Image (spheres, rainbow, N blue to C red):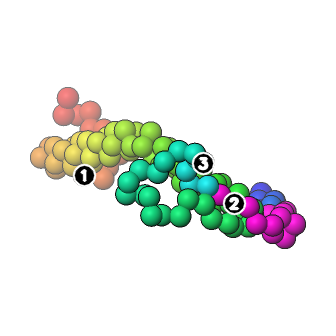
Amino acid sequence: MRILKLILLGLLAVVAVILAIANRGLVALHVWPDGMPLPEPMASWPNDFEMPIYLAILAAVFVGVVIGLTLEMLRESTHRREERRYRSEAARLYRENKELRAKLGQDPEDDVLGLEHA
């Protein structure tokens, strides 16, 4: 499975390089729509710049991945918080169980329940 994954990633990289070589032409990217006045702090900034189209596409993909990862991280934060709470509760219960077994004179590492104390 790992070899298949590496082969697919290699093919994807080759396709990306071929597309980048084939699309080296410059494209003008506009920061603000034409005809609309720029807000005062941005009035002195350049409104457009040129870059190769493959860089524009890669930048858009990168921004999309970052936004997706950020949203996923925010979505999973409640699950991670609950997992930490459950882990700490399990550790506390394990320590309590170990202390109670030690008070009863049982081996804390013994997995067999002592029914004679019931």
Gap in angstroms between the C-alphas marked 3 and 2: 13 Å
Q: Amino acid at mark 1?
A: Asp
Residue at 42 percent across and 43 percent down: it is 74
Name the spot of residue 33 as percent of width and height, x first. Answer: 58, 47
Residue 90, can we see it? no
Q: Amino acid at mark 2?
A: Ala
Q: Label 1 belongs to which residue?
A: 107
Tell whether position 54 is magenta.
no
Q: Label 2 belongs to which residue?
A: 28
Up/down of 46 relative to 72, above or below: below
Up/down of 13 relative to 42, above or below: below
Name the spot of residue 14 as percent of width and height, x first. Answer: 84, 67
Left or right of residue 94: residue 102 = left
Q: Nearer the viewer, residue 57 or 106?
A: 57
Q: Earlier in the sequence, mark 3 or mark 2?
A: 2
Residue range of the region highlighted in magenta in the rendering: 15-29
Up/down of 94 relative to 48, above or below: above
Residue at 69 percent across and 60 percent down: it is 28
Q: Label 3 belongs to which residue?
A: 34
Determine whether label 1 and label 2 are within 8 Å by CB.
Answer: no
Left or right of residue 22: residue 74 = left
Q: Earlier in the sequence, mark 3 or mark 1?
A: 3
Name the spot of residue 54 as percent of width and height, x first. Answer: 75, 63
Determine whether label 3 and label 2 are within 8 Å by CB.
Answer: no
Q: Amino acid at mark 3?
A: Asp
Left or right of residue 28: residue 99 = left
